[in-house]
Image: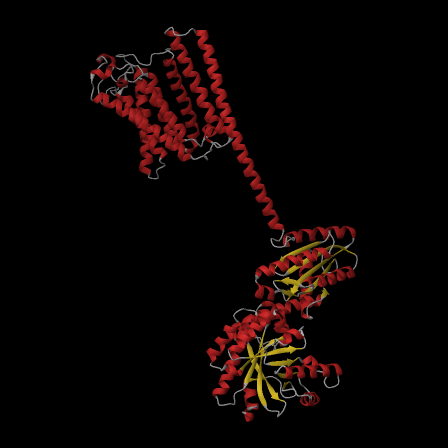
Amino acid sequence: MDSFPSFSPDRYSRYAQFLGLTVLGICALVFAGWAWYEPILTESGVALYQMKVNTIIGLACGAVSLWLHIGKHRRLAVRRAARGLAGLMAAIGLLNMIQYLFDVNVGIDELLQRDPYTAANRNPGRMSVPTSCGMIITGATLLMLQQKRWSSRGVKLAAVSMFAWTGLAVAYLYGLASLYEFNAYGGIAIPTVACFILLNAGILLAQAQQGFMFYFTNRSYAGLAARRLLPTAIITPILLNWLVLLGHEVGMIDIRTALAIETIIIALVLTLVVGWCARSLLAFERLVSIKQSEKMQALEKAARLAHYDGLTGLPNRVLLNERLGEAIKAAGRKAGSVSLLFIDLDRFKPINDTHGHQAGDNVLIQIGQRLRDVVRESDTVARLGGDEFVVLLAETRANDDAGLIAGKLITAIEQPYKVGEDEMYLSASIGISVFPKDGMEPQALMEHADAAMYYAKSLGKRNYQFYAPHMTHEAVRRASIERQMRIALEEGGFAVEYQPKVSVSNGRLIGVEALVRFKPTDGRPPISPVEFIPIAEESGLIVPLGRWVLEEACRQNKAWQDAGYLPLQVSVNVSAAQFRSGNFADLVHNALKSTGLSPAYLDLEITETTVMQNFEYAIKLMRQLQGLGVSVSIDDFGTGSSSLSKLKLFSADTLKIDRSFIRDLPDDRDDAAITCAIIDLARNLNQRVIAEGVETKEQFAFLQEHGCDEVQGFYFSAPLPAEKFESMYARQW
């Protein structure tokens, strides 16, 4: 394939500089002939040294001016020098023309050297009329190049001048004119013609990207053909006709045969050149076609990425908004309704944290496919990012339709997912908004569905809720609480309170649980943990908050011990996000090291649900924590999904019975049976058992009767600030 170099003005500028140097070389050689004249040199048929001295000066000025112009020098003195040399060239020609027109001698015919072969009375050294005109035109052309508004006209003038001098050379070649008559005044030397042709060609190449020259220098099909066909079209006829004429004059060939041969050769040459151009153009066209195809593919890919999710292939937010707008317009015309279901996955983050993002991506792909399988072809399933999906039901007849679909979607999502060797389970919270009841614009429907989804999460997740106005206020309140929590983490708006743990056998204090409390720094009333803990978990603030609670509890316990109080074990709740962080054991080790608390006086409470989400990882981490000397308790025991086969592998030190089983003791037979079973199970597994939420004497008596080891609850004490806890229980230390 032929190569097609891209258009580069610098390449043609180098050509122009080379032509300028060639002109300077010819001028230097001719001047050397005048300075060191030898008679033998004048016998040359070309009469090289008969170029006039003034002609040498003018052409040299033009060549240097062209060189300076091509260099694009920024210095003002250089630009002025270029204009001055061009003006000098034009002035020399103009003065010579004045001498011819008015038959005067202004004294410039022998500026440097007298012509020894020209009679004294014939004005020696004077250039011919054509040469004078050429000086004026070329000098004016160089001056025009210095001005942007005149440069295009200068290029046209240079083209006319070059073809005029080329025509003069052709006339000499065919014997129609004698360019130089030896020892004759006013003749034109062959080097003069060559220099004018080269200088004007250099001007054209210097302006290769302007005017008609761009037709020959551009990278298009037309430029390629012009660069190849033009030289052939000019040189071939001139050369062949001259050879025919020369052969005819010497009697080598008759005119008819010569013309026939010339015709065949011209046809053959032009055919070869045209074929060469066609071959190159075809290859170039294929290359352009490939590039255009690649460009179209890139545009299609970009368009798809702009409207579809790169992971699941589902429509993204942009395309969803377009389709939602179209569905609203269609429903408005038909007086119909449109339902928007905002889906957020529950407990998805543990998959990324424990199995990696690749496993999480695979689960998201499966969820996208399941959602598509539930809805109709005319409906839209979109992924907004992360674990958020939206389903657009373009035509719904009643709210029951959207509710029915939402229930099916939750059921589909709750089916098990194979992640490595484990089966993972997810659930979803769904918020539903309906056009036109809940909004007339796409943005309003999205915001209201989002608010309904958060309300569904606040009700315990794994459900769907239709939007109601109070939900928007709830969403605003949640955002306000999150903002206040971020400020509180920086400004100390959190505090730790301590609830005692009491031995069932003797009623004495044997431990304490650290519980975080939140009072906004702006003076607002305290916010219940039931409200701010879920918000902290969803926003990710639970991790820095949990780290602070751990460090504060260890610090306070160590301070009590340093004050001489009887050492107690402090229990700290561990969130699921902390437990799955990957560096939780290091965090515990650093907290103990920084506070100086012995590991024996720290107990970490981990919920049963957190353990069962990734059982193998949980067991490994629990044993790692116990290796540090820390105790581990299973919190909310009985509310998760522990199997008997896995229960025996629990390496926990304590089982903590959830308050939901204690609340109705001893009257509720089912709660009583479950509580007794957990106590017996813990005893058989050689684990201690503690009951939380004990609020009445009857509850305590039941637990005491059935052998529970420890209890805590409002029956003994509410959670207390450190100072009150210390003063109330100082007598037992």
Q: Position of residue 277 (x, y in %)?
A: 50, 26
* Residue 22 appears left or right of 476: left
The residue under the point 67% across, 85% down is 694
Foreground residue among 694 and 13: 694
Above or below 5: residue 346? below
Number of numbered callouts drawn? 0
Q: In the drawing, does residue 48 fall left or right of residue 461? A: left
Q: Is residue 22 left or right of residue 551?
A: left
Q: Is residue 530 visible?
A: no
> Which colour style is shown?
secondary structure
Quarter residue 643 falls in: bottom right
Rendering coords of residue 424 (x, y %): 64, 65
* Residue 589 % position (x, y): 49, 76
Is 15 situated above or below 474?
above
Q: Quadrant of the C terminus?
A: bottom right
Q: Is residue 108 left or right of residue 682?
A: left
Which residue appears at 44% of the width and 10% of the height?
A: 258
Looking at the image, can residue 478 be seen? yes
Residue 100 is situated, as x and y percent measured from the top left of the image, at 31, 15
Question: From the viewer's perspective, is residue 264 above or below residue 637?
Answer: above
Quarter-of-image position of residue 35: top left
**Residue drawn at (42%, 6%), measured in percent from left and top?**
254
Please name the residue shown 69% across and 63% down the image.
415
Above or below, 304 against 277 in this view is below
Asked whether 83 or 8 is in front, the reply is 8
